[in-house]
Amino acid sequence: MALMWASFVLLTLVALLFVVVPFFKRERIQRLDHNANSELIRIYHQRLDELKADLDNQRIDAQMHDESVIEQKRRLLNELSPEKALNSKGNNRIFALTGAGFLIVLTAIFYGYTGSQQQIKGWHDAMANLKSYGERAVMQDGEPLTPNELQAFALALRTKLDQSGDDEVAWMLLGRVAMSLNEFDMAMQSFDKVLKMNPDNKQVLISYSQVLLMEGSDANMSRAATMLSRVLKAEPTNIDAISLLALIAYERKDWLQAKTAFEVLLASMQQNDPRYSMIAERIAEIDAHLNNEQQVTNTKLAEASNSEISITVDLDSALADSLPQNGTLFVFAKAASGPQMPLAVVKMTEYSFPLTVTLSDSNAMVEGLNLSSVDKIILTARLSKDATVVTSSGELEGKSDVLERANVKEYSLLINELIP
């Protein structure tokens, strides 16, 4: 602070020198110029006297006399410039003092409007109130800190850390104050400092997790969950960590984990706790989500069950001698009209007739193209020689007529055709 004011005084003195010195320098120059001009004027009058004497003695005529006088006047004017001829009649010391006073007043006014005296005063007040701010923030002693006081508290903490070096408690307080001010980057930087000094600081791990959740990205939520897991590993009943994990699970729509965490929280509270009803409502909401998911699952299972077809496959005895060696049996269903991609396929390399297979949506080859997606189907059983579903000469096949899928639960299919 003293250095700053010394700098102000020094700069003011330098400015005064620039204002005052030219006045005195000007006065000295003017005095020198005045003496030189007097000598030139004396010489001018002496020459005029000489010209007058020459005219009287008729050494020159009147015309030459007049021309010579004009020439002398012209020469005098050329030698006497206006600046050199100026004779200051004022008091330069008064001018210098006036300029210096004006400079000082102007400087004071300019600093009053644009200077940082209010910020400096606020900084001094913040440092003086650092202890009281800490008591009100940490010990809840007195009124809560206002936003302006939080800003002052953060300024004082940064100053203390700059002057005294790293301090775990100060960094932790600065991080929490930054959270209150929504300065999340400052909060995370502060908490990182604490965790470098003490990686197992549970309070900071929880506070850091809160900041990450406020940021909201999936990566931040995963990082927060990792930090909270460290806390619960050391302290399994930490309510703050459990509540934050419940929120993370809820945001991720992990309903079972969220419900478990909220139930633990509810069991730790009294019914008159203002948070009790809120958590109970959240659990009821999660139950509704779980019921909806169960209904969706049941519907899908029912649809899958409705789409199942049990097919009994047998071989025509007349074709027993035409069985391909090491053949592959394909049993599949196609849409009666539309895409030729099989809706469901069962492939077997070991078989004996008669046999029974089941086709359902779980046997689909392409997502979204399954038995449930069409109304009319054709069932096919084919004995392939090359282990592909593409037909070739010498393979055996049996097909059904066009069937209403919803009405078919069981079907007998006979392989009775030799593909030419």
Image (cartoon, rainbow, N blue to C red):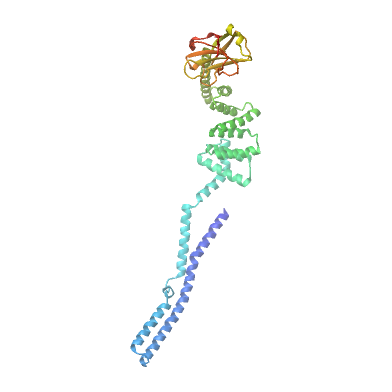
Q: Is residue 137 visible?
A: yes
Residue 369 to residue 189: above or below:
above
Q: Quadrant of residue 386?
A: top right
Q: Residue at x 35, y 85 (%)?
A: 66
Q: Would you say residue 128 is visible in this rendering?
A: no
Q: Nearer the viewer, residue 210 or 365?
A: 365
Q: Residue furthest top?
A: 317
Q: Residue furthest front?
A: 420
Which one is nearer the viewer's eye here, 302 or 271?
302
Residue at 55 percent across and 56 percent down: it is: 5
Residue lying farthest to the bottom in this orientation:
57
Identified at 54% across, 27% down, the residue is 251
Residue 285: x and y, percent?
A: 51, 21
Measured as percent of width and height from the top left, residue 209 is found at 58, 33
Where does the image place residue 356, in percent across and percent down from the top left? 58, 9
Residue 324 lies, with reference to residue 151, above or below; the image says above
Relative height, residue 81 to residue 405 (above, below): below
Farthest residue, direction left: 62
State the image coordinates of residue 195 (x, y, percent, origin top left).
63, 37
Quadrant where the C terminus lies?
top right
Q: How many marks?
A: 0
Q: Nearer the viewer, residue 74 or 99?
A: 74
Quarter location, residue 348: top right
